[in-house]
Amino acid sequence: MKASNASTTTESATARNASIKAADEAGFGSVAADMAGWRVRQGVPCRDAHEIAGACVRRWEAAGIELWGLTDADVMGISAHLAPEVRLVLAVDGALAARSAKGGTAPARVADQLGAARSAASAARRWLAVGSHG
């Protein structure tokens, strides 16, 4: 990739984020695995956490609503392991933020990756500029 294309690539990635978020909020994604992961991080055995997430999906499908459309009563009626706070991971922003490992989709990790890409592009431009003179 040419150095001049690096900024175009990062701008394109930023612009696509809004359309990806809109598609996911429209129901084209599932955050049931995020719900299960949230429960596992809080000490619920993995098998139970995934079973609970599956129960939520079944309730969601039966009601014809999105997963984050479950009421507090729905959430707490599915399992004693659930609490209304689960909504934090049901929204796209919460799902992204949960992926905070290096290379993950959390906003801070994406900012790190974009910073590294910009630095590499800048270094490549400097190298090309020096190389073209000598």
Image: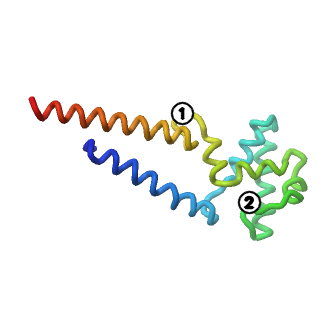
Q: Where is residue 28 in the image (x, y as percent from the top left)?
A: 60, 63
Query: Which residue, given by chain and number where applicable, does mark 2 sit on?
Result: 67
- The colour style of the image is rainbow
Q: Is residue 134 left or right of residue 4?
A: left
Residue ID for mark 1 = 102
| Image quadrant in which you'd find residue 114 | top left
In percent of the image, x 34 and y 47: which residue is there? 7
Query: Which residue is rendered at x = 40% and y = 54% of the image?
Result: 12
Residue name at image x 12 percent, y 35 percent: 132
Split into 4 quadrants, where in the image is the N terminus?
top left
What's the residue type where badge 1 is placed? Lys
Earlier sequence position, callout 1 versus callout 2: 2
In percent of width and height, residue 20 lies at 53, 58
Give the number of marks: 2
24 or 118: nearer the viewer = 118
Q: Looking at the picture, how far across and down is residue 14, in whole percent?
A: 46, 52
Q: Estimate how packed mark 1 is, as few (under 14), some (14 to 19) or many (20 or more) residues with alpha carbons within 10 Å.
A: few
Above or below 134: residue 107:
below
Q: Circle 1 — which element?
A: loop
Estimate how packed mark 2 is, as few (under 14), some (14 to 19) or many (20 or more) residues with alpha carbons within 10 Å: many
**Amino acid type, label 2:** Leu
Viewer-nearest residue: 109 or 48: 109
Would residue 77 be found to the left or right of residue 35 on screen? right
Label 1 to label 2: alpha-carbon separation: 28 Å
Which residue, as the protein is rendered here, is positioned at the far left? Answer: 134
